[in-house]
Image: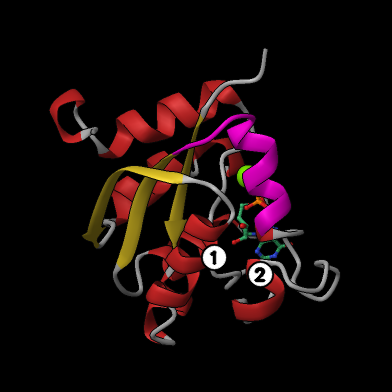
Amino acid sequence: MAGTLTFTMIKPDAVSKNAIGAIIKMINEAGFVIKAMKYTRLSESQAQQFYAIHKGKPFFEGLVNFMTSGPIVAIALEKENAVADFRKLIGATNPEVANEGTVRKLYATNVQQNAVHGSDSDENANLETNFFFSEVEKF
Ligand code: IDP
Ligand code: MG
């Protein structure tokens, strides 16, 4: 059975566009409940660790530079079928091909500065949530 937890970040581009409120509204209206939330800024080593799976890819260094360029909002979310439903809500990695009405279609700048992160599996949803939040910070 699919899990009920996913993890997202509102990325620096969307924060700098003052889109935090609009994006959280979309997330809530899609039925996700906030379990934990933090406004913070990633250090270089945190960004490298969070995106370690992409190390060696041509976009890795640019991604780390972008993700450390300003504050982010880290959010753990709960809903039935959380991972797949959230990825549907945010749309494709590249906003040029993202469906109309998705978060990335509405708020992303380009394939790198694409407004939000979304976990790709139940396992990574757990790892990513635990990367940012301790047990007592989840409600
Ligand atoms: P996802 O965020 O849709 O899961 P991933 O393939 O996991 O996409 O890539 C992680 C992040 O790396 C993307 O959200 C985006 O910010 C960045 N990225 C992915 N592919 C490219 C690319 O081709 N050029 C620049 N940045 C990219
Ligand atoms: Mg991914």
Q: Amino acid at mark 1?
A: Met
- Can residue 18 be seen at all in this image of the molecule? yes
Does the magenta portion include 12? no
Residue linked to disc 2: 104
Vertical placement of residue 57 versus 123, above or below:
below
Span shown in magenta: 78-89
User: Could you say which is closer to the camera, residue 43 or residue 73?
Assistant: 73
Q: Image check: 130 left or right of 54?
A: left
At which x and y percent is residue 101? 74, 72
The N terminus, quarter of image:
top right
Residue 53 x, y percent position in the rendering: 57, 36
Q: Could one spot residue 58 in this view of the protein? A: no
Local secondary structure at mark 1: helix
Q: Residue furthest left?
A: 136
C-alpha separation, residue under disc 2 versus residue under disc 1 = 11 Å
Question: Which residue corresponds to the image point at 82% horizontal and 76% vertical from the top-left?
Answer: 96
